[in-house]
Amino acid sequence: MSDRPRVALFVTCLVDLFRPSVGWAAVELLEAAGCRVEVPEPQVCCGQPAFNSGDRRTTEDLARQTIPTLEPFDYVVAPSGSCAGMLRKHFPELFDEDPAWKRRAEAVAAKSFELVSFLVEVRGMRKPPGRLCVRATYHDSCSGLRELGVKEQPRALLRAIPGLELVEMEAAEVCCGFGGTFCVKYPEISTKMVEDKTRRAEATGAELLLAGDLGCLLNMAGRLARRGSALRVRHVAEVLAGRLDAAPIGYGKEG
Amino acid sequence: MSEARTAVLARIRAQLARGSEAEAAAVADVAARLGRPTANLVPARGRVAGEACVAQFEAMARKVGTEVERLAGPEAIRPAVLAALRRHNLPMRLVRAADPLLEAAGLEAEPLLEVRTGVPEEADPTGLTVALAGIAETGTLLLASAAERPTLLAFLPETSLVVLPTEAIVGSYEEAWARLRGRPGWPPRSVNLITGPSRTGDIPPSIELGAHGPKRLILFLVDRVA
Amino acid sequence: MEPQSLAFRTRARRAIADPVIATAMQRLETGWQLGRARAAAALPEFDALRDAAVAIKNHALSHLDLYLEAFERRFAERGGVIHWARDAAEARAIALSICREAGAKTVTKSKSMVAEEIGLNPFLEASGLQVVETDLGEYVIQLAGEVPSHLVGPAVHMTRERIAELFAKAHGGPPKQESAALVAEARQVLRRRYLEADVGITGANFLIAETGSIVTVTNEGNAELTQGLPRIHLAITGIEKVVPTVEDAFTLLRLLARSATGQEFAGYTTFLTGPKRPEERDGPQAMHLILLDNGRSSMLGGAMREMLRCIRCGACMNHCPVYLATGGHAYGWVYVGPMGSVLTPQFVGIDKAWTLPNASTFCGRCEEVCPVRIPLPKLMRHWREEAHRRGLAPPTARAGLGLWGFLARRPRLYRLATRAAAALLGALGRRRGRFGRLPLAAGWTGSRDFPAPEGQTFAAQWRARRGGRP
């Protein structure tokens, strides 16, 4: 492996569709960390919606579609703990009865990372390029936290941003209630969860709520906007890269 | 043997599907494990000894609401029992185990105290018995049933008095159990690990003592027991 | 009990609107959830003990037949009578015949989830017996005619005021205000019951193969009075509860109370080996044990085996954001929270409970705190797969997933569709940046705005700006 590893950015379907800015922030961060970034095709979805709906066949089909595109790279990096968790933890589980694919899935899994933990642990990033004077709080997305151990890495980088004050919310590790299709299958429970979560985030007095997964961010931003809250929401990569040209999530030209 | 037994065991075996070779190994494994019971991981706080062990036991027992009183010797049991009953404003009446340590305490000689030996009844306010071990890990008492030590003494009366020789304090549950293992009649019918008085959190908002078992657990830690 | 789990969403909605449940759930968070965290932090070996516990349970389960036989031998040597039951009906019939043979009129009972699982109380009552629960939480819900809403605290959903009303109605007199007075009242009433009872029924937390002992764990001391006062002690438990040695039980016991309530050890842990011995002055004259299978053996060979490690501590529910939003009754059967979402489909059938394993965000907190490291999300996913195979999800959900799967398998078509969607929604939402309402998205927009896409997909931008070159 050279000093400038070839990194496949697994952009994730939500970032692709909703917020390409997060993809660009990830590209900039990876390049700042000395990586050559590529976006291999075809890139659709890691298959998690099917996996969590019990549709094993579609999941396996999508894994078989995804794995070959990622194989040529030194690393695979996703700006999402949830999708990275799918690649890293669940892909190999899919092929218990198919040794050839299992080997391939394991090889891809071993080099797949969530963006921020990759920057800190693999690339040794200590000082992110971003600059921002703001009081921010960070929500731990479940998959990143519990499947991949993403906890201190984003906090360490955020604290290294001059002017950024990081304040912890109560129960930062508790789920926001997104849960993929859960949020529309069980909207009442999901609403209760996101209400609790966003109230705790607001109670910190922060101006900005950050997380590493767009699903959680859309959920929390949607709830905060509905309540007319002053708390704004962004993906942690946007702040780390200093790419704040897009309006906060759920806000447009006119706010 | 019953049809259900045969069916359940057959289902288990079908599911486990050990081959004949694995079967022999499994049988040997089980025999070995049962024949030589071995302690698993014992936390550091259960690996204490000497006076540190006693101190930790006392602290842990107090933490769970046990009243602990350390006595210099068996001769102090009688006055300590009397003082405890008076301190808590309890009737001068108790039912006790026929344990030699309590036989020797001479409680019957106390003129104002009514003492009975045996099994407690509904109306008995106070029971007095002897523990076989104290466990420093969590301040837990180990009591064991025997002809001379009815189990109910520590459960039915509202106040439970327990005598424990200081020398019977050990670090862990495993050590306490090891003191029983191999005694005649082992294991006793009923071995009770008691950690504080009876409590319940079922009626909010507070934890209340004396749900069914004793409301009060008073422990006399007796030094110099032969 | 007829499972009501298919109505989970309706029941959950009702529960979320109930301030009494919200208060109760807050108590769980500040009490047991925090308690577990403190207890785990206070014991440096806590995680190593979890590993040891997993190894013990795995070993016991992979030799289950042999340990059950060893247990049975020792149990019988000590004068216990063992009864095997293939299913709930068989277990109920055995329990009834033991009560009948004893000429029993009153039966006291200390908390047993297996008894709930087989619906023992209603069955015995229908047969003319008076059954009295002695665990205070169970007693309260028995008076209310309800089922447990939590594994460890069956009445966690009750307020003191409601309990006071129930006691006043059952015992007479004006309702008492203080918890202490209510506890004292129950103590007095239940004392009489213990002494009247002919049979005492308990569960068992563990069975010990080495000694033929059963282990009960309580804080109230009710198990000891339930089994110690009547003439007959009847224990009932599942076949998966057997562990090899007393030492193995101690390892599990070190985790049980800490995981359940944050106590370092429960108030009363009792090892019982046989009935009263000839020289003894107390203890029951006879000791029976019903060993229940009820589908457990069928879990051994597949993915569900890991669930048989469960020691019923309730930590999964104390930490589950879904359970903490809805309380236990929403789950509609005996076992609730994450462990219930795995066990209920097993016991009542996936067709009657597919909603439960679907009602999870897979946040993973349950697995994180499980003392025996049961991969609860993975097991819930197993049930989702089963439900998917059987086509149990509503047609709209299946059609949505099917369409998405169709597109996702065709990357070019997917690109076109996402580009079009991003462009359309992006244009419509450009000014405000979000939608208050969207067709087909009522589940989202009922309570949340829907953030609008920026307008172009990342894939399109990348191709335009970097031309596919690094």
Image (cartoon, coloured by chain):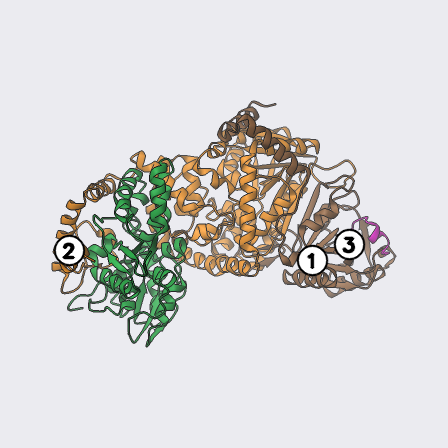
| Residue with the mark numbered 3 | B94
| Mark 1 or 2, closer to the camera | 2
**Residue C121: x %, y % from top left:** 52, 37
Q: Please indicate, yes or no, whether residue C170 appears anywhere in the rendered image.
A: no
Chain coloured orange in this rendering: C
Inter-mark Cα distance, 3 to 2: 88 Å
Between B109 and B168, the one nearer to me in the picture: B168
Q: Residue B77's image quarter?
A: bottom right
Q: Mark 1 Cα within 10 Å, few/some/many (few <14, many 20+)?
A: many
Mark 3 belongs to which subunit? B
Mark 3 secondary-structure assignment:
strand
3D distance between C-alphas at marks 3 and 1 = 14 Å
Q: Nearer the viewer, mark 3 or mark 1?
A: 1
User: Residue under mark 2: which chain is it in?
Assistant: C
Q: Specify the amino acid type for callout 2.
A: Ala
Residue C55 is left or right of residue B67, and the answer is: left
